[in-house]
Amino acid sequence: MKNIASPLKIFYMAVWRNFLTLTRYKVNFIFSIITSILWAVGMLLFSLIFDSSMLGRTVGTTNYVAFIIFGMSFQCWQGTALWGASSMLQGELSTGQIDYTFTCPFSRYQYIVSNIAALAVQDSLFFLPMFCIGLRLANTTLTIQGLLLGLASIILSVAALVQFGVIFAALTLRYRQVTAIFSFFNFIIQMLSGMFIPLQILPVPLQIIGFSVPVTFGMDLLRHYTMGTLTIFDPIHEWTAFILQLVLLGIVAKFIVSHLEGKAKEEGLHYA
């Protein structure tokens, strides 16, 4: 008569198997732990946004609903820019299609950017409704010139974030599983860029980190031109820093794609 494993033993085996899978990709495992701690702290910071008097003193407006909605509308493009291409490459790694992709005579950097841009066009359908609601709530301070300048700041923000997305896509080729790294940078972008929380209320070390995120100046300029909020620095300085970030990130992204593509080919373009 065959032995039948007990439900408890099956449960133990399932837990152990999942743990082994989780720890197999060590970078992903470590960032999972770090990110869970950071989000707990981030929720405490997020509660500050509902203090309208604090918001008025910090950014010059008490319209916290419009403040948050503009940040939420940006999430549609943020997700696409950061991990759209990486998800695509993970799928190609799983199906083996990537072997054919990498034999085609075109730049890997251009291939990744083009696919992100295609996804961004698609996600515009989800961005526009919420963005329009934000504009409606800010109608008392909105002008045509402010709208155009605000849109320009958003487009540059997305272009700069795409360079981060290219880097993450290249990391997928090298490390295979990097979803926890996405969560970590998602926290940095949402909590330290002014997307939901005014950067000015954060401690100086966190503000310095926030200044390195392209979304920071993009969101600051968008709200300034549409809501009349106070900017962190002079708008001219923010535009200059913004454009420099885009150029530098583009150079870094091209280098990393070229470097990690070679490493990935040495180890094989498949899941290990």
Image: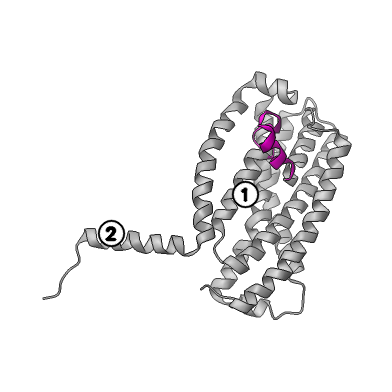
Residue 130: give x, y in percent of width and height: 67, 40
In the visual, does 87 lie left or right of 252? left
Query: Which residue in the protein does label 2 denote?
Result: 11
Residue picked out by circle 1: 185
Position of residue 3 relative to residue 76, above or below, is below
Q: Position of residue 203 (x, y in %)?
A: 66, 32
Query: Which residue is drawn at the image coordinates 76% and 79% (left, top)?
Result: 105
Figure quadrant of the N terminus:
bottom left
In this view, the residue in front, 66 or 109, is 109
Q: Is residue 8 left or right of residue 183?
A: left
**Residue type at numbered disc 2:** Phe
In front of the other: 240 or 159: 240
Q: What secondary structure is marked by label 1?
A: helix
Q: Residue furthest front?
A: 205
Q: Position of residue 216 (x, y in %)?
A: 73, 40
Q: Is residue 206 magenta?
A: yes
